[in-house]
Amino acid sequence: MEEKMPRKLVLVGYHKSGTSTIFKQAKLLYSVPFSEDELQNIKFMIQSRLYSYLGILLEGREWFEEECLLEKSKGKGQLLDEPGPLGNASQLNNKTKYSIGPRQKAFADWLIKAMVSGNLEAIFPAATREYAPFVEELWKDPAIQATYDGGMK
C-alpha cells in the first residue's frame, strides 16, 4: 500500500503558538526544500533571537555585578556612592567575576539600549556581520560564562 503525503496543510494558532515551527518541521520531514526567502527569514529569526537572548544575558550580568559590588561594599562598610581609596565603585578595585572590559561594556550598553528601545530588529541583518566578533568575544568572556552558569543554578 502506498503512503500518501499531505498536499496541503493548514495550521492555525495565535502568534507565538508554534504553528510556524510545526510547518518548518513538516517541510523537513517530507524533504520539501525551503525557498530562498524562507531561508533568509529563518536566518533573520535565528540572528535576531540570538541578539535578544544575549541582551537578556547582559542585563543579568549587570544585575549580578551590582549585587556583588553591594556585597563587597557591605563587607567594607562603604556605600557604593562614597569614594573609596581609589575612587568610586566603578574603579578597578571593585571588579567582580561579572565585570567586563570597556570594549565589551560599550557593545553591551549599545545592545541593551537597542533592545529596550525596540530597535533591535531594525538593525538586522546588516549588523550581524559587523557585530559577530563582539558576540563571539562576549560569549568567551569569563563574566558572561559566570552569568550563564549563575542563571542556570
Image (cartoon, grey):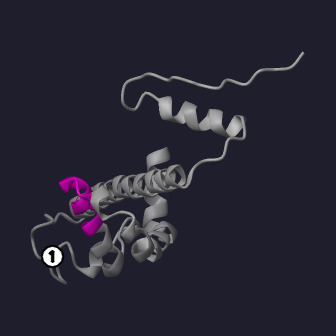
Residue at the spot of label 1? 88
Give the image quarter of residue 74. bottom left
- Residue drawn at (49%, 53%), measured in percent from left and top? 37
Name the element at disc 1. Answer: loop
Is 56 rendered above or below residue 81?
Answer: above
Is 47 rendered above or below residue 9?
Answer: below
Magenta stretch encompasses residue 108 = no
Please tell me which residue lies in front, 88 or 52. 52
Q: Residue furthest left?
A: 82
Q: Give the x, y percent position of residue 118.
A: 22, 53
Q: Residue furthest top?
A: 1
Q: Amino acid at mark 1?
A: Asn
Magenta stretch encompasses residue 118 = yes
At label 1, counting other C-alpha atoms closer than 10 Å, the crowd grade (few under 14, some 14-19, many 20 or more) is some
Q: Is residue 94 left or right of residue 48?
A: left
Give the image quarter of residue 120. bottom left
Q: Give the x, y percent position of residue 78.
A: 15, 66
Residue 71 visible in the current orientation: no
Q: Residue furthest bottom?
A: 86
Total labels drawn: 1
- Residue drawn at (24%, 61%), measured in percent from left and top? 114
- Residue drawn at (48%, 53%), measured in percent from left and top? 46
Q: Quadrant of the N terminus?
A: top right
Q: Give the x, y percent position of residue 147.
A: 43, 57
Q: Give the x, y percent position of residue 57.
A: 38, 55
Q: Is residue 1 left or right of residue 48?
A: right
Q: Residue furthest right?
A: 1
Residues shaded magenta: 109-119
- Residue drawn at (31%, 67%), measured in percent from left and top? 108
